[in-house]
Image (spheres, helix red, strand yellow):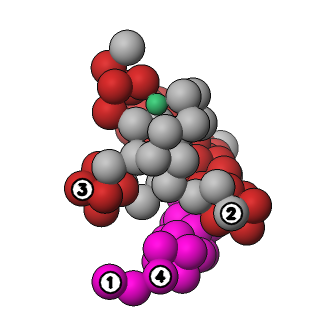
């Protein structure tokens, strides 16, 4: 199994790139609105809303990944942020950035 820290850093770089692309796309849509008619303006607004919600999801994922990397740097990676128990390997394998063990997440 590869180093989770490495995987997380690669993922973080990818997420940041995607966020940059998404915010750039949203900005472009905004510019276009001034030159377009009413229907396409609504289209543009819809596209912008989609881009905004995607950007929000990406930001959340970035924060979560950064927090996992902070824990890796602090030597507490793999420990549940709530109860401090070790997170099950299968759970970590499914989501390397997960901050909680399965009992805390279902609680
Ligand atoms: Zn826990």
SS under mark 2: loop
Q: Residue 75 carries which label?
A: 2
Nearest to the observer: residue 85 or residue 14? 85
Residue named by callout 4: 3
Q: Quick one: label 2 or label 3, which is nearer the N terminus?
A: 2
Between tags 1 and 2, which lies in front?
A: 2
Residue named by callout 3: 90
* Distance (Cα) linking label 2 and label 3: 20 Å
The answer to whether residue 5 is visible is yes
Dot 4 surroundings within 10 Å: few (below 14), some, or many (20 or more)? few
Q: Quick one: label 3 or label 1, which is nearer the N terminus?
A: 1
- Residue 72 located left or right of residue 14: right
Residue 63, position as x, y percentages in the image? 64, 48
Majority secondary structure of magenta residues: helix
Q: Quick one: label 1 or label 2, which is nearer the N terminus?
A: 1
* Distance (Cα) linking label 4 and label 2: 13 Å
Q: In this view, does 30 lie above or below 70?
A: above
Q: Quick one: label 4 or label 3, which is nearer the N terminus?
A: 4
Q: Which mark is residue 1?
A: 1
SS under mark 1: loop
Q: In this view, does 72 lie above or below 40?
A: below
SS under mark 4: loop
Between tags 4 and 2, which lies in front?
A: 2
Residue at 32 percent of width and 20 percent of height: 106
Q: Is residue 98 above or below residue 24?
A: above
């Amino acid at each position: 199994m590869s180093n989770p820290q490495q995987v997380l850093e690669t993922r973080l770089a990818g997420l940041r790139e995607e966020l940059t692309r998404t915010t750039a796309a949203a900005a472009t849509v905004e510019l276009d609105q001034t030159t377009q008619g009413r229907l396409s303006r609504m289209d543009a607004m819809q596209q912008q809303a989609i881009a905004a919600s995607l950007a929000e999801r990406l930001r959340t994922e970035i924060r979560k990944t950064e927090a996992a990397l902070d824990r890796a740097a602090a030597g507490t990676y793999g420990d549940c942020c709530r109860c401090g128990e070790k997170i099950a390997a299968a759970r970590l394998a499914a989501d390397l950035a997960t901050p909680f063990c399965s009992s805390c997440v279902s609680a």
